[in-house]
Image: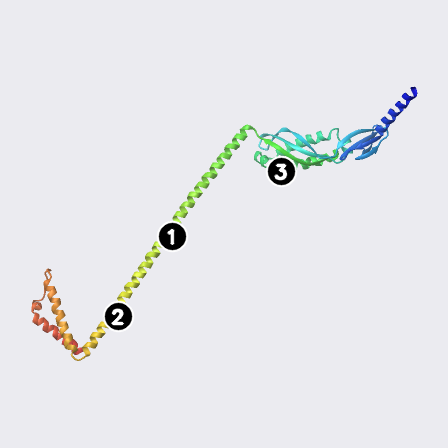
Amino acid sequence: MSSLIVILIVVVAAFFILRTTIRVVPQQRAWVVERLGKYHAVLQPGLNFIIPFLDRIAFRFDMREVPMEVPAQVCISFDNTTMTVDGVLYLQITDSVKAAYGSSNPFTAVIQLAQTTMRSEIGKLHLDAALSSRQLLNTAVASSVDEAAINWGVKVLRYEIKDITPPQEIIRAMELQITAEREKRALIAKSEGQRQQQINTSEGQRQQDINVADGRKQAEVLRAQGEAAAIQLVAEATAAAIRVIGDAARAPGGIEALQMQLAKDYIDKWGNLAKASTSLVIPADLGNIGALVGTALSMVKQQGGAA
């Protein structure tokens, strides 16, 4: 019975020693080993062996990227406006030894440094610039914190601002400003539309007046061309008639016939003048028909002799 107890004790002791000797480190983990209270080695992922009672696992680090919440804090801008800023910091331990011995708590140190850097960067900007320069602030904080975190074995991958919240009075003022800007743009757009409408109307009226003037000009030109053509035709017809009369006058008996026609036309014109109701003052011998006919015949003879 006593031998069985001894065997059992030996087995338990061997199992305990074996358990403390063999260490299996998961992937993307780093375990820092101290021997007699002093740094000894870093156990890499996989199977590792340590000396029981001399070595101990002092620190266990996760080497994956870790998102850390940066608590909200009050910052003061360059124009003395307070605002609340919070964010997310993405970290990764790259040197487990520095992370173990460079700082008592590297993550807390990085978060505190991110907060102080954010306050410093906000203090350089006016409120409007701070609200519109998130990417600039993110880059500035990540760069500054990463430079200081090298001694802590931490790599700052990026920093992202979650919210920037100005005071309620500023928010209301910004809303009023936005409303005023929108109303201004609406009025400008309306006035531009009215201006364009007036321009289009005036251009249309101008084109209409030009078209009407061109139409009138073309009508006048056509009318003048028609009148000129008519005058030319009348002149040509008159000239042709004169030539026919001249040819007839040169024929035998033509002068006598022409004299008779002239006398007849003269008498007809006098008769028409006598029928009119208008009172006329005429020479005393104008009523002597015979004398007038004789005068007409003598004129015709003179013209015939001249011809």
How far across and down, in percent of the image, does residue 37 sit?
A: 83, 28
Q: Earlier in the sequence, mark 3 or mark 2?
A: 3
Of the numbered discs in the image, which one, if any, rests on residue 207?
1
Q: Position of residue 290 (x, y in %)?
A: 7, 71
**Which residue occupies the extreme top position in the image?**
1
Report if residue 53 is visible in the image: no
- Residue 217 locus on image (x, y percent): 33, 58
Task: Decide which of tag 3 and tag 1 comes sooner along the chain.
Answer: 3
Residue beneath disc 3: 135
Please tell me which residue is depicted at 46% across the width and 39% down the height of the picture: 186
**Of the residues shown, which amino acid type is indicated by label 2?**
Glu
Q: Above or below — where is 181 with respect to 269? A: above
Residue at position x 38%, y 48% from top?
Answer: 202
Residue annotated with mark 2: 236
Q: How many marks?
A: 3
Residue at image coords 41%, 48%: 200
Q: Nearer the viewer, mark 2 or mark 1?
A: 2
The answer to whether residue 163 shows anywhere in this view is: yes
Residues 114 and 41: in front is 41
* Quadrant of res 253: bottom left
**Label 3: how many residues lie within 10 Å, few (<14), some (14-19) or many (20+)?**
few
Q: How far apart are the alpha carbons under marks 3 and 2?
A: 96 Å
Q: Residue at x 8, y 70 (%)?
A: 289
Q: Secondary structure at mark 1?
A: helix
The tag earlier along the polypeptide, 2 or 1, is 1
Three-letter amino acid code of the residue under disc 1: Gln
